[in-house]
Amino acid sequence: MDNTEIIIQEAIEMDAVRSMIKKLDQYQLDLYGNESCKLESLDYLQQARAYILGAYGDSKLIAMGAVKLFDDYAEIKRMYVDEAHRGLGLAKSILAQLEAYAKQNGKALVCLETGNLQYAALAFYKNMGYAIVEKYGKHRPNRVSVYHAKVI
């Protein structure tokens, strides 16, 4: 990978984001099935005014993440790194920038949801300082979701 950079929402090529979200959706559907997945589309993220970051390598979107702001917390959404580009620190960089955006917007608490079968994600969020919590916001305990929170 010759040239990787993190870019802001306004510069992201939205067709590439749609394609990446489609990959993430399929991954989650394969793990958990339709009944357990609450998948947010790019259109929904845009309507919710989510702040979306992407990492490009050689002019191709290879990783992404988003954050939505609520009254008393921020929520990380749609974190994904293309399989061929994992282990390069892209998720860490994106997450750090999403947290910084949340903090700049007055949020002291960042929350997220991942699945109980996403072992690498569970380890990643633990390493990034997130603690497992029972629930947050509108989310309630269920058989597959693992909720996390971090004070920033």
Image (cartoon, rainbow, N blue to C red):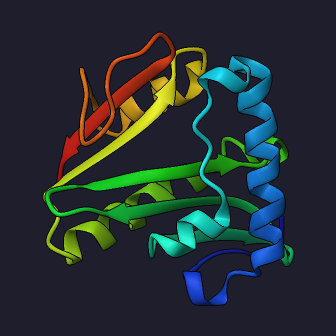
Give the vertical position of 64 relative to 129 (above or below).
Answer: below
Q: Residue at x 86, y 74 (%)?
A: 58
The answer to whether residue 120 of the structure is visible from this angle is: yes
* Total numbered labels placed on residues in the image: 0
Residue 59, horizontal then vertical, whole percent: 85, 78
To which quarter of the image does residue 150 belong? top left
Q: Quadrant of residue 87?
A: top right
Residue found at the very far front of the displayed protein: 35
Q: Quadrant of the C terminus?
A: bottom left
Q: Position of residue 65 (x, y in %)?
A: 55, 58
Q: Quadrant of the N terminus?
A: bottom right
Residue 130 in view: no
Which residue sits furthest bottom? Answer: 10
Q: Give the image location of residue 43, x and y in percent.
A: 64, 69
Looking at the image, residue 92 sits to the left or right of residue 39; the answer is left
Residue closest to the eye, 37 or 103:
37
In this rendering, would 41 be left or right of 141?
right
The residue that appears at 33% across and 34% down in the rendered structure is 139
Q: Residue at x 57, y 64 (%)?
A: 44
Residue 149 x/y as whole percent: 25, 38
Q: Is 116 situated above or below 26?
A: above
